[in-house]
Image (cartoon, rainbow, N blue to C red):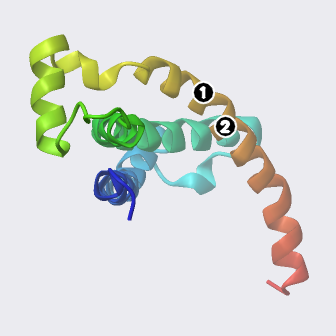
Amino acid sequence: LWRGSATHIAATCLGGAVRLSALRTTQMWTMPGGDRHYQGFEGYLRRCAFLYAASAAALLVAYPLDVTYTCLAADNASPRSFRGIAHFLRRARQQHGIFSFYRGFPLCLASAVPFVAIATGIHDLLAPLLLKRMGQ
């Protein structure tokens, strides 16, 4: 495996677990009474809101590990700047503070908005067609 792969795997697993655990909670916040009460554009906006909120929660937890992975994978100088995950985390916090693990986080959150909007829209358009084709 490549350098930093354990960090990448941990971030992926942790992000997925947080996203799945946050989905139901954020859905209850944005769609009180269940999703059948909201139709049309309001339902679409509410679905986008809870999906975005769950994704943002996952990103908040997993983003520092993604930053760590990126820095370890890009560290190909000789000699290497970082000996491993713990060394990078200590050094980055000492040199730049705790917020250094969240550089680029606002951009990541902002880029998730159109992604969620497009993905939810495509799902809403194609799901009925696929369900009809499958006989459901």
Q: Quadrant of residue 2?
A: bottom left
Residue neighbourhood size for the residue with mark 2, other residues' Cα within 10 Å, grouped as few (<14), some (14–19), many (≥20): few
Q: CA distance from mark 1 to mark 2?
A: 7 Å
Considering depth in this image, is 134 or 69 the residue closer to the camera? 69
> Label 1 sits on what residue type?
Ser
Label count reads: 2
Whether residues under marks 1 and 2 lie with C-beta atoms below 8 angstroms apart, the answer is yes
Q: Residue at x 25, y 34 (%)?
A: 79
Q: Secondary structure at mark 2?
A: helix
Q: Which mark is residue 115?
A: 2
Residue neighbourhood size for the residue with mark 1, other residues' Cα within 10 Å, grouped as few (<14), some (14–19), many (≥20): few
Residue underneath mark 1: 111
Q: Secondary structure at mark 1?
A: helix
Residue 133 in picture, x, y percent from top left: 90, 80
Residue 130 in picture, x, y percent from top left: 84, 73
Q: Quadrant of residue 46?
A: top right
